[in-house]
Amino acid sequence: MNAPRAWTEMNQRWLAARLAALKARLQARLDGAAGEAEVEAAAEAEAAEAADVGFVPALELCSRCFGLSGFERELLLLAAGVEIDDGLRALRDDRLGGQLTFASALGLLALPHWSAIGPAAPLRHWRLVQWAVGQPAPHAALTVDERVLLFLTGLPAIDARLDGLLSLADRAPAADAPAAERIAALLARGDGVPAILVDGQAGAAARRDSAVAAAHRCKVQALLIAVEDLPGAPAERAETARLVDREAALAEAVVVLWSRLDDRHEAAAAFIDELRCPLVVAGGVERSRLRDGRRAFETVAVGRARAGASPEAAQRVPPAALDEALQQFHVAPCIVDECLARVPAQDPRDPQAPGRALWQALREAARGGLEALAQRIDTETSFDDLVLPAAQSAQLREIAAQLRHRHTVYETWQFARRGTRGLGIAALFAGESGTGKTMAAEAIANACRLDLFRIDLAATVSKYIGETEKNLKRLFDAAEASGAVLLFDEADALFGKRSEVKDSHDRYANIEVAYLLQRIESYRGLAVLTSNMKSALDRAFLRRIRFVVQFPFPDEAARAELWRRQFPAAAPLQGIDCAALAAMPLAGGNLRSIAVNAAFSAAAASGPITQRLVVDAARAEFAKLERAPIAVPGGGR
């Protein structure tokens, strides 16, 4: 894309000389004057002189790239000349009736042939020149394509029609070195147009980076296209593929097709079938669709990072801490190296600090595209913040323990060899709103130092057949790299009972439920379902749920403890009687709302939080719930 300055200057001098020679020759032919042969001979001598120093002009590169005949080459030069050379523009206006046409070029240029105007001929197929719409091609005004004109003049550019679709990877990223070497070897093999599938367990970004690094090793440009940006209409997709092919040819580049969310798109396979350029597919299409396509693909696998993948590991992080982090977070070795580079040196006063820093860095790196699909919840909630009976507290701690030790049981003790079914940890938190179900999920995630993502059911469930499964697939695939805790709030809306099949909508609704059963069983992290109506859940789900935790409505003693925890130490309190407030039969979520509203009332009055302000806020909460308030001592009227 960015040619050396010396080549650009030489190319522009050469182009100016060629245009001057072409102008003189055409002037001589139009005037019927002698000396046309001498002018042509002088131009050829100049070109030969340039070739002696190894210089190849852009016009010659374009001619070789697209297989232009001598006549097509001269026609392209003439079309470019009338755009940038005043003398040729005047010649067109004065002698050719104000426009250049194919018919006029036939009478002006050497070795003319009508096949140059055919739809499959290079000039038209590759959109090197354009004909005005509304007239027969031989007599329509002919102009050079803007991107081609910029190329002929040596100016760096990308076709404006590909803005938002195609981007240039102008630097080599950190990547899986063995995979990049194998891809580079295939790109440089020279036995046809390369077509390579980058596969394996690494994430989409890691596979893309390996492809880009390989292109830089081969000293060729890498043009990135995300499958999410591909047009859906077949005609638009075919035209886009042709422009991408042309861009790759002009830039001597390889196209890298990938998916931001490691998703699969039907349009990707059809787009690949249209392409002719060197291509690396780093995601976005099913492997079976590539096997059935027009091109034969070589496969290169990029694996997940393994312990000892970087020589820096032993120096920066204790081996046990590195192993623990790599068991949890599945990212490419290049990402591990980047995270290790940010880890501080070991401090004798805190030997665990490097391990904690690496864990946090990998935790952030492994989020990938999950944040685009779900809401990440950041809190500092711990088990000590929960007010629950002993049995429920023990269940929550058991869930956290299984989440922490699943690698030991499944991998070290080889329980996973019996099959992947039933390896996922699923928990159902049932109970009324405000009883602490979401807080419990937060506490488990924090205890295991994992991210917690709340699933937006409105964005997941679609009325269109098959879309819900696609959304769920994207969600679970993105979550696999981090093993994050997934929180399906109000899960009965998504995990409801399967119905009797009466029409096609019932059939596809049941398919959605079945798909969810499979993904929850195989997901290596924790999936938490919360529901106010346990009875509304499908029994097939309940059979596959490892833990069912019933969150009881808090009794008066529990409510008193909850009230004591609502007010931070910095909050100015005056006369708050938690035992009296506990007489109000409200859940913890309601108590939180009351405490916050009372605090705002106190701040507005520039005074402390009093019992009366709390009771007033409680009356508003009861009104919101459409329930009669309970009289509380100290609350005034």
Image (cartoon, grey):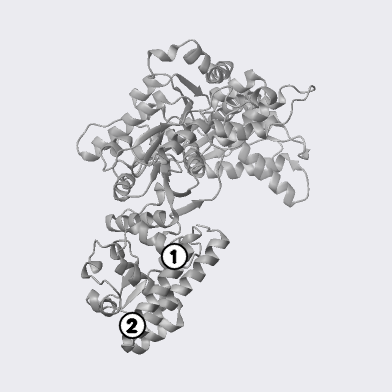
User: In the rendered image of this protein, does residue 179 appear above or below residue 192?
Assistant: above
How many marks on residues?
2
Mark 2 = which residue?
Answer: 99
Q: Secondary structure at mark 1?
A: helix
User: Where is residue 236 drawn, in percent x and y?
Assistant: 31, 58
- Image-quadrant location for residue 25: bottom left
Tell me if 395 is positioned left or right of 44 in this view.
right
User: Where is residue 111 drawn, in percent x and y?
Assistant: 26, 71
Tell me if 527 is positioned left or right of 234 in this view.
right
Q: Residue furthest right?
A: 349
Q: Amino acid at mark 1?
A: Ala
> Do we see residue 96 in this rendering?
no
Pick the front one: 209 or 395:
209
- Rate crowding at label 1 as few (under 14), some (14 to 19) or many (20 or more) other CA atoms within 10 Å: few
Q: Amino acid at mark 2?
A: Gln
First in sequence, mark 1 or 2: give its number: 1
Query: Which residue is at 53% across, 64% downward?
Result: 8
- Rate crowding at label 2 as few (under 14), some (14 to 19) or many (20 or more) other CA atoms within 10 Å: some
User: Where is residue 48 drawn, in percent x and y?
Assistant: 44, 65
User: Where is residue 24 drawn, in percent x and y?
Assistant: 40, 82
- Image-quadrant location for residue 587: top right
Q: Residue furthest left?
A: 502
Mark 1 = which residue?
Answer: 48
Question: Which numbered mark, 1 or 2, is in the foreground of this view?
Answer: 1
Pick the front one: 83 or 503:
83
> Do we see residue 69 in this rendering?
yes
Query: Which residue is at 69% across, 28% downward?
Result: 579
